[in-house]
Structure formats: structure tokens, C-alpha cells
Amino acid sequence: MKGRQMYNMPRQGSGESGSGYSARSSDLSLDEEREHFRRDTERQALFQLEKARTKPVVFAVKTNVAFDGSLDDDSPVHGSAVSFGIGDYLHVMERYDPNWWIGRKVQENCEIGFIPSPAKLENLRIQLAQNKTAKVYSQKNTQSGNKLGSFIPHKNKEGPVKVTINEDGEEVVTPAEPTENVDTTGGASTLVEGKAKKKGLLGNKVETVPPYDVVPSMRPVVIIGPSLKGYEVTDMMQKALFDHLKRRFEGRIIITRVSADISLAKKNALNNPSKRALIERSNSRGSNLVEVQNEIERIFELSKSLQLVVLDCDTINHPSQLLKTSLNPILVYLQISSPKVLQRLIKSRGKSQTKNMNVQMVAAEKLAQCPLEMWDIILHENSLEDASDHLCGWLEEYWAATHPPHRGETPGTTNTQQQSRMFRQRPTEEDAEYARMRERYEEE
């Protein structure tokens, strides 16, 4: 008809009128399915997390990176990612999937949760590097677009400059701000890596550091000092501490003698077959590497019991001997601060010990020069009781950190205190001899 417009009306039942509604409903159902799948996956992960609370520790690691799970928590159970810093220790109960482990940080009041696997941390590192590179390029493009005077050459002997135009239309040249160390993420980072170690004669090769180092489930305790092992003063004082620890932690401690030179157990040498073969050919003591490796494996096996492991090492006289091993021990310095007191103690043991006075004094001086950061505990007390209480108090805290109470339980401190008082009331002959030597030769 003339003057009228014809409109095509959708026919009922043809499906044309409900096409938009059906698309929206399909999208809604897809979202519901995704949400249902997410909730079901999280429910299963939560069940696995609760089940792992009663499982034993499978292995332990020391961290070489820092991870903050609260910033970008995509763990299987939201809010259950374990955060840690560089140098922390983690107990792992099981591998949940390729990206996550189940475990906890070795620290009091730290709950079990999800720990990122090395593969997950590597993906994070690549993602953060790509984001940083993209932001640096975008900043450069923005700055080059805003430089109105960028085509005017400037002589600059002090480094890069920034050219801007002020309100009066004048060109202003200012030093450019460095962008290498600036945090362009707008906040803290989920992953923080440690300083890369350089190797080679010129230091131009960067050594790749793994995010985790496998360590014993319980860090072994190594007592060093006051001088050299194999001499009566040092052996007697360490034996007195061993006996006190054995009584104090009865049923919770393993004290074992280590005769092999475990300082040869370098992580890189034992883990790298080519280096290991080279050492065996060049080093006269290379034949002992198999014995050393067996001793390291035995210490790892002892630590799986989650009891305190104390090593009575025949060959360890300095903390630097164990720095490059995989043991990560608790280093205890049994110190005699006064050289005169040590001299008198050595003289009191007879002529056979006095003739080796200089060797023992030099060794004690080297220990005194060690930085404090090399030691976990320094025992400088003048009596066995005080030194033992100091060491036992530290080890009790470590025990509490490695043995979290189950839900519904409270840490049993009363039994520990009663045992402490009971053992203090039962001195032995070694304790009495130790006390007499300390009191007799104490510096006035």
C-alpha cells in the first residue's frame, strides 16, 4: 500500500522471536556449569587437603624464591596457598597435581595448604618477565610519543635525558629516571627471586638456581667447638651435651656418629655425574665419595622419622665445611670466649694434650672469627646446665614448628616442662666434671 511501510513480523513457533533469549539462556547455563565444575573441583581439593593433615612428611625443601599466595591465589582451594620467603623450609605431604603440592611452612601456627610446584613457579617467572617487558616497551613508546623535542639533538655526557615542554613553551631537559629496578607492576610481586649467582672466571655466566633445594625432613644438629674434634677438651664437652640432650629428649632424638668426611658431599658434585667422575679421577679421596653419599642418604633416612637428629661428626671443625652440602644443618657453636680459659682447660688434660696446644688455639680463634650469621645457636654460658637449657629451649621451639598439633589438640607443654625439671635434677658424672672444669678455670 502506498505510504505505508511493511514490517516483517516474526511468526510464532518459528524460533526467530526467541533467538536472543535462547542465546542468553545458553550462556547462563554454560556459566552455571562452569561454576558447578569449579565448586566440585574445590570440594574435592578441600577433601584432599583435610586428608593430608594426617599423612606423614614425604620430603622437605628449602626455598630459593619468595612466594606470596595472597596476591594472586589460583590454588585449588581459594585462600589456601602457602606463602613463604627466601630461605624458609617447607614440609611436603603429597603432590596434588603438576602445579601444586600439599604441605606447610615449618613454623609454629602455620596451617597446611597448597605449595606451588617448580613448574608452577617457572610459569609465574615467565609470566612476570613478559609483563615487565611489555610494560617497559609501552612506557618507552609513551615517552617517545610525548617528546615534542625528540628530533632536536642534545649533547649528553651524563646518560639518558628526558625532554619536555613547560607551560611557557620552553624546552626542558632533565635526567631520565632509571626503569630497570622500578617495580612496574603497581604493587608487590607474587614471586620474588633471589640474586642470580655468577660463575666463570669473568663472572659472565649466570648460574640457574632452582626454586627449591631438597633437604632432610628434620635439619640435623651439628655441634662445633670449642676447638678441634679428636682432642679431649672438645670431645668431653660435646659428649656432656650429647648426654644431656639424650635425657632431655628421650624417645624424640637420634644421636649418631658420622666418621665419613661429609664436607665432600657438595650438592653440585654429587648430583652431577660428570663432575662426580672428574672428582673421582683427580681427587685422591674420590674413592670415599660413595661412602660419603651413603652417609648422606642415611642421614636423610633418619630424618624421615621426624625425630631430632644429632650428628657426632669426626671431621667437621668449621661451619664452612657444611655450607655447600644438602644437609642444611642446625649449626651450634660451643664457645669458650676467653683464650686463657681454653689454655687452662687444655693444660688440665695432661702433657699429651698440652703438646698440641697451638693447633687447638688456632682452631678456636678461627671459630671466633666466623660471622654470627653462620651459626644458628651460640652457647657461651659458663655452666653445662645453662648451655643445655639454651640449646634445649631452641630445639623445643624447632620441635613445635615441625610437629604441629592436630585439630582439637593443644601443644603439650606441661609434660615437656616436667621432663625438663626431672632431667635437671639427675646430673651425671660427665655433668659434674664439666661443671668443675668450668668453675675452676673460669676467668676472674
Image (spheres, grey):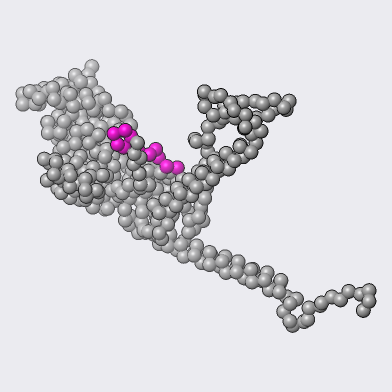
Residue at left offset 19%, top offset 36%: 316
| Along the viewing direction, whichever of 244 and 338 lies nearer the viewer | 338
Q: Position of residue 200 (x, y in %)?
A: 29, 36
Quadrant of the image containing the C terminus: top left
Quadrant of the image containing the N terminus: bottom right
| Along the viewing direction, whichever of 68 and 335 lies nearer the viewer | 68
Q: Is residue 353 left or right of residue 381?
A: left
Q: Quadrant of residue 429?
A: top left
Above-or-below relation of 132 to 437:
below
The part of the chain drawn in magenta is 192-203
| Along the viewing direction, whichever of 290 and 127 lies nearer the viewer | 127
Above-or-below relation of 138 to 101:
above
Residue at left offset 64%, top offset 34%: 147
Residue 2 visible to an observer of this rendering: yes
Residue at left offset 42%, top offset 42%: 193
Q: Position of residue 12 (x, y in %)?
A: 77, 82
Look at the image and say whether residue 18 sits in the magenta stretch: no
Q: Position of residue 364 (x, y in %)?
A: 20, 26
Residue 431 visible to an observer of this rendering: no
From this viewpoint, which residue is outermost toward the bottom?
13
